[in-house]
Image (cartoon, grey):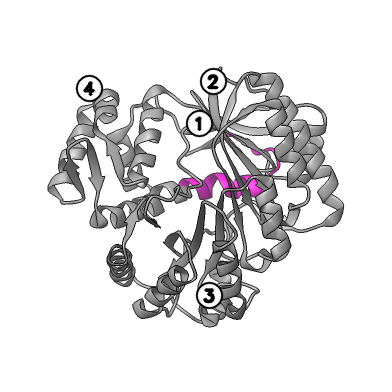
């Protein structure tokens, strides 16, 4: 109770009493009218389960592939009946490891294009040991233009420490092949502040990714969730996570190095070369989600599918949307949702901020405080989150957002149809 007090106090300062962060069990959901949204496709299968990964995934099982793919087709049909004339503005395929179903994704994308108007890019995540010539060619055939490669580290010591199954020797060829395959953007995910890692080692990983042709790098620390196995792994290896001061020093060093190498910041964690299209998985304001554990965010509504692959297959085959939980969102909650992701992108359009928060004295006071604490800069048309502000919003994300995700996902991973969850 004592540990919850500061978190609730800050939230109470921002939100109103009527804004209840509560997920209710709900199998029948009425979707609001909307003209355009993004589409998220979740592929839960992995050939090995990395202990630090917090996402909904299961070990690859060939017997589950056909029924899971059919369930996704069924869910597309259910969304088509509910939303009809919606245009899909972008497609993001995540997991799990989406390329485990590289041959099946073609029919899924074709079905989406048949049922909805589609425009914008197709983005996908993958792992380096899946980046063979044949896979890259199939990704191009799918229409993928934005590719993200989960390298994490070019150092065998840290790959082993976080439980990755590949060796660093495969990484140069995998990344360079992806970089020359003709995608609009190739992003490389790298972790920093790994147990025992030095700033020089983290900077070496950054330089290696850029030398191999990455158009964007996403640099993030090792997040820990109670329901993942990473804590047990680290304890077994008898290592400690870096202290806050170490993480702060490494983030500053990486930030300065990225800018010195000509990159521009596109999010708290992301830096890109020039004006290549930005790879991002999380900043779409409206989206529908297909697959076990996928989320859907539409005006006034935030919901999750059941995380159980078996229950997802069963429910979708019955021509029902496999939604397990929903949260009704008030206008003020939606405004904060918008503000959070604009801060994540480190750029808040001033005109839209004024429109949404013109009469909210609390938020305007917090903005004034952030400017005077030198976390945010007023740069004409935008409020810009600087390097200092980016690091501290990361801590806010750790303390609040990841805590909330953990509360919801822990229940969803253990219960196919969880009960009420109040955050």
At which x and y percent is residue 330?
Answer: 42, 23
Distance between the Cα atoms at labels 3 and 4?
48 Å
Q: Quadrant of residue 366?
A: top left
Distance between the Cα atoms at labels 1 and 2?
9 Å
Q: Earlier in the sequence, mark 1 or mark 2?
A: 2
In front of the other: label 1 or label 4? Answer: 1
Residue 302 in view here: no
What numbered label is drawn on residue 34? Answer: 2
Distance between the Cα atoms at labels 3 and 2?
45 Å
60, above or below 1, in the image: below
Q: Which residue matches tag 1?
A: 286
At which x and y percent is residue 404?
Answer: 47, 45
The secondary element bearing badge 4 is classed as loop
Q: Which residue matches tag 4?
A: 359
In front of the other: label 3 or label 4? Answer: 4
Q: Reply yes or no: does residue 66 show up in magenta.
A: no
Q: Earlier in the sequence, mark 3 or mark 4?
A: 3
Query: Principal SS element in the magenta part?
Result: helix
Q: Quadrant of residue 131?
A: bottom right
Span shown in magenta: 404-420
What numbered label is drawn on residue 309? Answer: none
Q: Earlier in the sequence, mark 3 or mark 1?
A: 3
Task: Report the residue at 74% width, 44% height from top.
Answer: 106
Marks 1/4 in contact by CB < 8 Å: the verdict is no
Q: Which residue matches tag 3?
A: 234
Q: Earlier in the sequence, mark 3 or mark 2?
A: 2
Marks 1/2 in contact by CB < 8 Å: the verdict is yes
184 to the left or right of 270: right
Q: Earlier in the sequence, mark 4 or mark 2?
A: 2
Q: Quadrant of residue 75?
A: top right
Mark 3: give few (<14), some (14-19) or many (20+) Cα within 10 Å. Answer: some
């Amino acid at each position: 109770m004592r540990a919850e007090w500061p978190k609730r106090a800050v939230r109470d300062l921002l939100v109103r009493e009527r804004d209840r962060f509560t997920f209710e069990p709900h199998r029948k959901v009425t979707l609001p009218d909307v003209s355009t949204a993004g589409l998220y496709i979740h592929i839960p299968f992995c050939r090995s389960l990395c202990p630090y990964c917090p996402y909904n995934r299961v070990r690859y099982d060939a017997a589950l592939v056909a029924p899971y793919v059919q369930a996704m087709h069924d869910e597309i049909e259910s969304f088509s009946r509910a939303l009809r004339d919606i245009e899909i503005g972008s497609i993001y395929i995540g997991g799990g490891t989406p390329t485990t179903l590289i041959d099946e994704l073609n029919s899924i994308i074709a079905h989406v294009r048949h049922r909805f108007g589609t425009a914008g890019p197709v983005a996908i995540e993958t792992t380096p040991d899946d980046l063979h010539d044949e896979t890259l060619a199939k990704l191009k055939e799918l229409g993928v233009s934005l590719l993200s490669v989960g390298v994490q580290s070019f150092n065998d010591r840290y790959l082993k420490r976080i439980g990755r199954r590949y060796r660093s020797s495969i990484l140069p060829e995998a990344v360079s092949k992806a970089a020359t395959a003709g995608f609009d953007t190739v992003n490389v995910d790298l972790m920093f502040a790994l147990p025992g890692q030095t700033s020089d080692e983290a900077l070496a990983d950054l330089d290696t990714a850029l030398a191999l042709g990455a158009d964007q790098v996403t640099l993030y620390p090792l997040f820990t969730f109670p329901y993942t196995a990473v804590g047990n792994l680290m304890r077994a290896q008898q290592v400690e996570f870096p202290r806050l001061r170490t993480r702060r020093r490494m983030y500053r060093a990486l930030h300065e190095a990225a800018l010195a190498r000509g990159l521009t910041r596109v999010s708290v964690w992301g830096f890109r070369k020039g004006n290549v299209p930005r790879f991002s998985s999380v900043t779409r304001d409206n989206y529908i989600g297909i697959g076990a554990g996928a989320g859907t965010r539409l005006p006034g509504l935030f919901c999750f599918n059941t995380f159980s692959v078996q229950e997802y297959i069963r429910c979708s085959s019955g021509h029902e949307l496999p939604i397990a939980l929903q949260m009704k969102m008030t206008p003020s909650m939606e405004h904060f949702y918008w503000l959070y992701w604009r801060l994540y992108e480190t750029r808040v359009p001033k005109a839209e901020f004024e429109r949404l928060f013109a009469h909210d004295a609390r938020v305007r006071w917090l903005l004034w405080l952030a400017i005077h604490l030198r976390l945010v800069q007023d740069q004409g048309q935008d409020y810009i989150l600087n390097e200092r502000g980016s690091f501290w919003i990361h801590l806010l994300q750790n303390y609040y957002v990841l805590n909330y995700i953990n509360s919801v996902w822990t229940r969803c991973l253990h219960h196919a149809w969880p009960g009420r969850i109040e955050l």
